[in-house]
Amino acid sequence: MSEPLGLYIMAALYVFAGLMHFIRPKMYLRIMPRYLPAHKALVFWSGVSEILLGVALCIPGLKALAIYGIIAMLLVFLLVHVYMLSSKKAAAGFPRWVLLLRLPLQFALMYWAYSYL
């Protein structure tokens, strides 16, 4: 375990988040922007992606690729966060202030990943 503990914490968070796509898929389906097609497939593949990227963070030869993948994924997930601000139904019951905080949080997560390059 030569990598910093924070990298393994980040990896575990992405694996956990990916698993949640399969444990609570309805939650993710509720927040999918209407303009995106194939919601079930997108929830499935985003969950798979989070799991694979989280695991890849722990493999030295794949770490850099995983970091760039995580940053790209977080950029794409911004679509969901912005969509959730568009209406009360899209907000899925989250308070508006929480939804607003999620936007800079995405950039903080990108920076956290980038810091391990």
Image (cartoon, helix red, strand yellow):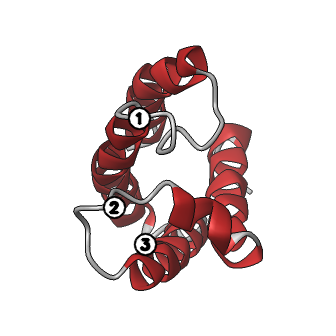
Disc 2 to disc 3, C-alpha distance: 14 Å
Disc 1 to disc 3, C-alpha distance: 43 Å
Q: Quadrant of residue 117?
A: top left
**Cβ atoms under marks 2 and 3 closer than 8 Å:** no
Q: Quadrant of residue 87?
A: top left
Disc 1 to disc 2, C-alpha distance: 29 Å
Quadrant (top left/top right/bottom left/bottom right) for the N terminus: bottom right
Pointer 3: residues within 10 angstroms few (<14), some, or many (20+)? few
Q: Residue at x 25, y 67 (%)?
A: 36
Tell me which amino acid carries mark 1.
Ser
Pointer 2: residues within 10 angstroms few (<14), some, or many (20+)? some
Q: Can you identify the residue that label 1 sits on? A: 87
Tell me which amino acid carries mark 3.
Gly
Q: Can you identify the residue that label 3 sits on? A: 61
Q: Is residue 10 above or below residue 14?
A: above
Frontmost residue, 85 versus 111: 85
Q: Can you identify the residue that label 2 sits on? A: 69
- Secondary structure, mark 1, is loop
Q: Position of residue 26 (x, y in %)?
A: 65, 69
Visible in this render: residue 57? no
Question: Of marks 1 and 2, which one's residue comes earlier in the chain?
Answer: 2
Tell me which amino acid carries mark 2.
Gly
Q: Nearer the viewer, mark 1 or mark 3?
A: 1
